[in-house]
Image (tube, helix red, strand yellow):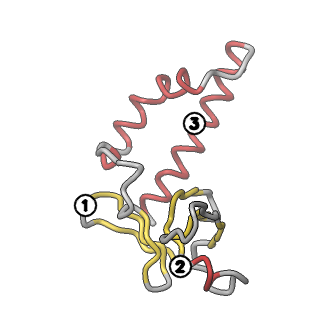
Amino acid sequence: MTYLNDMRDAVHYGVLKAEELRRTNGKMPLPIDLRREIKQWFDSTYDHTKHHVNPLDSELVKLQDGFIRITFQPHEYEYIPVNSNHSKYSEYSQYGVSELLLRDRKVVLSGSPIRRRSGKGRSALMSTTPP
């Protein structure tokens, strides 16, 4: 959960910096300008984030034994319990994870069937609230 808390804090800092830049310049900064503005702070504060992540790698986020397993570095994982009371959990747990959205109080997954019977896949959403 340390990494999730770090990212929450980084997003909070980015929002504060964007508001500061808006007040200074009279308009919201472009995302690339905000990134340049906070890059030095981010890199010095969160040195563990300096590793390449391949967004197509199916091993980065997996549903495993009632948990969402998130890979932060090789052999370094965070496990977040899944809300198994979700009405479609049994169906969704059969899907491969295609996207992960981390919010301050929720983790939202979208996915598609691992095996496609026809040429079309469906997407699904499942969310959990960390303890």
Report which residue position mark 3 lands on.
Answer: 14
Q: Report the mark closest to the observer, 2 or 1.
A: 2
Q: Report the mark closest to the observer, 3 or 1.
A: 1
Q: Nearer the viewer, residue 56 or 105?
A: 56
Q: Secondary structure at mark 3?
A: helix
Q: Secondary structure at mark 2?
A: loop
- Mark 2 and mark 1 lie on one chain; the one further toward the N terminus is 1
Report which residue position mark 1 lands on.
Answer: 74
Q: Is residue 88 above or below residue 14?
A: below
Q: Nearer the viewer, residue 26 or 114?
A: 114
Residues under labels 2 and 3: Cα distance?
A: 36 Å
Q: Secondary structure at mark 1?
A: loop
Q: Position of residue 24 (x, y in %)?
A: 68, 15
Kindly identify the amino acid type of the residue bearing the numbered disc 2. Gln
Residues under labels 3 and 1: Cα distance?
A: 27 Å
Q: Residue at x 62, y 58 (%)?
A: 104
Whether the residues at callouts 2 and 3 have beta carbons within 8 Å, the answer is no
Kindly identify the amino acid type of the residue bearing the numbered disc 3. Gly
Q: Is residue 27 above or below residue 96?
A: above
Report which residue position mark 2 lands on.
Answer: 94
Q: Quadrant of the N terminus?
A: bottom left
Kindly identify the amino acid type of the residue bearing the numbered disc 1. Pro
Residues under labels 2 and 1: Cα distance?
A: 25 Å
